[in-house]
Amino acid sequence: MSPPLYGLDIETDTSVDGLDPSVSPIVAVAVATPDGDRVFQGPEDLVLHRTDELMSELDPGIVVTWNGSGFDLPFLTERARRLGVTLGLDLWDDGPERTEPGVVRGRWYAHDHLDGYRLYRADVGRSLGFPCGLKPLSRLVGLAPVEVDRSCIHLLDDAALEAYVASDARLARELVLRRWPVAERATDGCHPRPPD
């Protein structure tokens, strides 16, 4: 039996530099589970607490992100640090000779992490020359992503933001499910944290 997969996506405030965790708060987090989506919005510290609480309660599985190794997980960690919020999220790298700069591996409580973008980029991207962005790849395989102007996330109402962030979490989960069980070899648990 394969472990449950939990798609995770974050959205950040694009009224400032939404790619910089030193200035941009997280405005929404979605976790797509086998039983449905959970979306957290509101004050950032509460969003982080609720996300962490959910991760601590879910059955052990695999957190699936799309470029989470390079964006979502480091962003979550930095925002939590700045706000004094403790997360059960542990990040590490494999050293400069084996890891791209800024790319991490992770574990959130009992959940391994799998970056679907890196999984697809390693073979589909290389062999077909396809860029492997979440939405283009989703459309290619017949999925229907919710699309918005990424530069205007801060202008979305709560319902539109919820639909958007949940869609991305579901798409990441679905794309990795389509590659299972081969994808399992790409989990960060297959690359344990080096000793300190």
Image: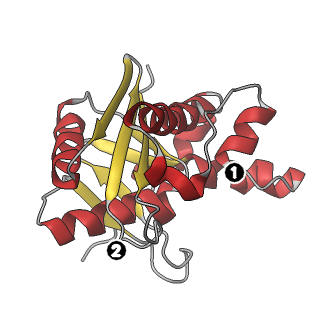
Residue 87 placed where, x, y %? Answer: 18, 55
Q: Look at label 1 and name its amino acid.
A: Gly
Residue 78 placed where, x, y %? Answer: 29, 69
* Image: 167 above or below 67: above
Q: Which mark is residue 69?
A: none
**Image point (19%, 69%), residue name:** 81
Residue 184 placed where, x, y %? Answer: 53, 39
**Image point (27%, 65%), residue name:** 79
**Image point (61%, 33%), residue name:** 146
Q: Say what secondary structure mark 1 lies in.
A: loop
Q: In the rendered image, which residue does mark 2 sit on?
A: 23
Q: Look at label 2 and name its amino acid.
A: Val
Q: Quadrant of residue 59?
A: top left
Residue situated furthest top in the rendering: 35
* Measured Cα–Cα span from mark 1 to mark 2: 25 Å
* Image: 92 above or below 142: below
Using the image as rendered, state which of residue 29 and residue 15 is in the foreground. Answer: 15
Q: Quadrant of residue 106?
A: bottom left
How was this image coloured?
Answer: secondary structure
Q: In the rendered image, which residue does mark 1 sit on?
A: 133
Crowding near the residue tagged with mark 2, few <14, some 14–19, many ≥20 C-alpha atoms within 10 Å:
few
Crowding near the residue tagged with mark 1, few <14, some 14–19, many ≥20 C-alpha atoms within 10 Å:
some
